[in-house]
Amino acid sequence: MQIPRFRYLIIACALAFATHGAQAQTEPPMKPGLWQIHIENEINGQKTPDMSERMKNMSPETRKKVEAAMKQQGVDAGDNGGRKACYSREMIERGRWAEQQLGCKTDYSNHSATSWKWHSSCPQIGYEGDGEAIFSSSENYVVTSSGVMTSGGKARTTRSTITAKWLAADCGDLKPLDLKP
């Protein structure tokens, strides 16, 4: 069982844009370790149910399979819409790895120690959009993005806000996030 494609994209973008290193910047603006990530999404102006809300309506067997699939990819489903993910030092330092795996091209209009603005084109997954990451510290960031996702010949307007907070250097039994498509 896999994370739905749009959810997968949002989680991937959270990491890709939070860890994307600029050539002029040698230190990533965030710490490796366990992160709490809260994601709010809209599609065509309608707020989408949070994963935890959708999981409440699943049978115990299905919920267990979804949680296991997420954990296998390095995401703990968490409660109240908060997911936990483990970012390794290597993942943060690699920068463009997620972008390359998703087949995206990202151009930055601003890339400072505290904020990044970009435009991304991801023809492989049918996404085109803009985003901004604000790093209030190495332990907190907020990513806002909006764009258009085309799937099955239908275009959908998407908006998301990702709020992340560093929890600990030790990820416990959660392995580093795996975003292989």
Image (tube, rainbow, N blue to C red):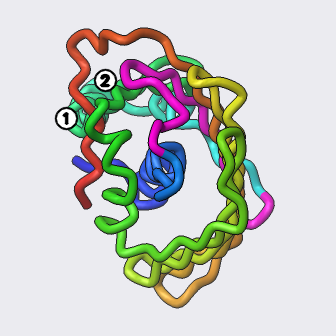
Residue 31: percent from left, percent from top:
45, 24
**Which residue is label 2 attached to?**
60
Q: Secondary structure at mark 1?
A: helix
Q: Using a 10 Å C-alpha cutoff, classify the residue at mark 1 as few (fewer than 14 neighbours), some (14 to 19) or many (20 or more).
A: some
State yes or no: residue 23 in magenta: no
Asked if the stretch drawn in magenta spans residue 42, the answer is: yes
Q: Name the N-terminal-most of marks 2 and 1.
A: 2
The residue wearing badge 1 is 72
Mark 2 nearby-residue class (10 Å; few <14, some 14–19, many ≥20): few
Quadrant containing the C terminus is: bottom left
Q: Magenta segment range? A: 26-45
Residue 102 coordinates in the image, percent (x, y): 35, 67
Indicate whether 10 appears above or below 163: below
Where is residue 156, by image quadrant? bottom right
- Residue 121 x, y percent position in the rendering: 54, 78
The mark lying in front, picked from 2 and 1, is 1
Q: Is 2 left, or right, of 161 in this rendering?
A: left
Q: Which amino acid lies under the numbered mark 2 shown in the image of this protein?
A: Pro
